[in-house]
Amino acid sequence: MSKTIIEAKDVVKRFGKITAVDGISFKVKKGEIFAFLGPNGAGKSTTISMLTTMLRPTSGKLMLNGHDVTKDQNSARKSFGIVFQDPAVEEELTAYENMRIHAVLYAVPKPEQSDSIEKLLKLVDLWERRDSLVRTYSGGMRRRLEIARGLMHHPKILFLDEPTLGLDTQTRNLLWDYVRKLSENEGMTIFFTTHYLDEAEAVAGKIAIIDHGKIVASGTTAQLAKKTGTKSLEDAYLQLTGSTVRDEASKGNNGLNVRSANRNSRLR
Amino acid sequence: MSVIYILWHRQMKRYIRSRSRIAGAIGQPLLFLMALGYGLGAVYEKAGEGDYLQFLVPGIIVQTLLFSGVFWGIQILFDKRFGFLKEMLVAPVSRTRILLGNALGGATISLIQALLVFGISFALGFRIDNWAMVPLAFAIMLVLSVTLTSFGAAIASMVDDFQGFQGINNFLIFPLFFLSSALYPLTDVPRVLQIISSVNPLTYSVDGLRWALLGQSHFGIGIDLAVMAVTMVACVAFAVNRFNRIQA
C-alpha cells in the first residue's frame, strides 16, 4: 500500500464572514497525479495557498510529506515545488538569474547549482535564451521557466495551479507529457488545478471536485462517472456543480469576492 | 547570509539596468537645490543668515534619502502584483531574511542616490566645514537609508494597490520633509512650527547631518544620534512586523 503524502483534515478558511474553504478533507498518495477541480471561486486557489504555507487555515490540519504545514513550515516548504496561477518570475532578470536565486533560496549546494540549472533549462528548451530578460519571454516560455525552477530542489510534490491557462496546444501537450514522466519515473506527486476537464481526464489518476468550499465528490474518472450516472468527466462535473455561471463570488458568500475579501479582511 | 546577499544583488541588478530610474530619482533633489539654493540664496543672505546653499545641502541629502527610500517600498507592491513575492514567500527561508535582503538592496540604492546628490552639490558650490567629520556624515546617511526603506517596506506591506501607497506616501512624505528643518533654520520660526518640527524624527537627521558637514546644530549631535538610532530600530521592527503579516 502506498503512502499518503498530502493530507487535509477538516480544513476551514474564513476571511471575515466569508467561508472560502468549508471543512475539506482529502488524501493524496505518493506518486499520484491528483486533479483538484471546481468552478471559479470554489476555493481551489485558497486551498493551494494553504497547502503551500502562504495562508494559514482558520482551523483543521494540513500535512505535506509528513510535516505539519502550519507548525513546521520550512520542512513543508522544502518538500514541494509550485507553478503559480499567475507567473511569479522576476521579469527584469534573466532566466539564468531567476534560476540562481531559486537555487540559493532553497539552499541547493553551490557546486551542484550550475549543472542543475543547465540541465533543467535544457530540459524546458530555454538554455539558448538563458541570458535574455524574462520580460522578453512569451507566456509559454515563462511557464516553462517556472516549471524548470520548481523542479530545481528535487521536490517530492509539485503543485500546478492552472498551469496550462493561456498556453497553446503544443505547449500544453509538452507540459502534460513531462508531468506524466515526472510521476512515472521519479515518483513525484502532482497536485494540479485546471478548468480544462479533458486534461484532468487524460492525466489525473484521482480527482476531487470542490464547490462552495466543500468537496462534493472524489475518485477516479470512472468512479465519478459511475457515481453520477454519466459518461464523461465533464458530464459528471456539470451534474455535481450545476451549470450556472459563476463569477468569483458564489451565493454562499453573499455576492462577495473571496480575493477582495482576503485583501480587505483584518487578518494583518 | 547568502540568501540576503542574493536578494540584495537582485535589487542592485534591477537598479543598474534601469538608468532612467537613476536620473529620475536625483532630478528632483537637484531641482530643489538649484531653484531654492540659488533662488532664495540672496534673500537668505540679506537676512543675515549666511550662505543658503550651504545650509540647504544637508536637508536635500535627507530629502533624497526620504523620497527614494520610502518610495522603494513600491518594489514590494510590484512583487506582490507581479508574483515574485510568492516565489520568495514559499521558499524555506524566514520572512525576516527575505525582507532584510530586499530592503538592504533598497537602502543601498537610496544611499547611492544621496551620494550622487552630495557629489553634485560640490559642483554647485557646496563646501565642507571639517573633513574629519565626513565618515560620520556617511554613517548618518547609512542609518537613515535603512530607516526610511524599512518605513517604505512597512507601508507597502500593509496596502495592496499603487494608488493607496501613493496616497499614504504623499500624506506622509511631504509633511515629514517640509516640517523638518531641511529648508529653514528652526531658530526664528514660529513656536508652533518649532514644536511640530521637534516631534518629527527626520528633523534630527537633518540636524545631525548638518552638524557633521557644517558644524551647526540646533539640538546637539548627541540627541540627534540618539533619536536616529531609536527611529531606525522602530522602523525596522515595524517593517519586520508588517512584512510577516502579508497574506499572499
Image: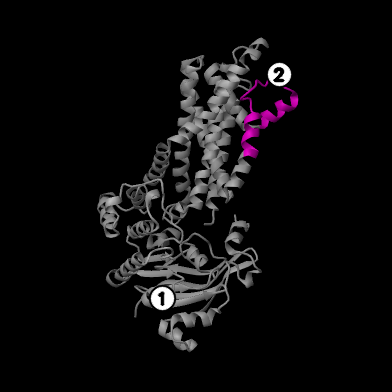
The answer to whether the residues at label 2 and label 1 have Cβ atoms under 8 Å apart is no
Tag shown at residue B23: none
Q: State how many labels appear.
A: 2
Same chain assignment for discs 2 and 1: no
Scheme of colours in the image: one colour
Which residue is more in the foreground, B177 or A202? A202
Vertical side of B32 occupied by A203: above or below: below
Which residue is more in the foreground, B155 or A248? A248
Q: Quadrant of residue A261?
A: bottom right
Q: Secondary structure at mark 2?
A: loop
The magenta stretch is B170-199
Q: Is residue A82 left or right of residue B153?
A: left
Near mark 1 (Cα within 10 A), the count class, few <14, some 14-19 or many ≥20, is few
Residue hosting label 1: A198
Q: Looking at the picture, which amino acid does disc 2 mark?
A: Asp
**Residue A37 at x, y percent in the picture:** 47, 73
**Residue A106 at x, y percent in the picture:** 36, 54
Q: Looking at the picture, which amino acid does disc 1 mark?
A: Asp
Separation of marks 2 and 1 at Cα, in angstroms: 78 Å
**Residue B49 at x, y percent in the picture:** 64, 13
Q: Quadrant of the N terminus of chain B?
A: top left
Which residue is more in the foreground, A26 or A159? A159
Marked residue chain, label 2: B
Residue hosting label 2: B188
Near mark 2 (Cα within 10 A), the count class, few <14, some 14-19 or many ≥20, is few
Residue B55 in view here: no
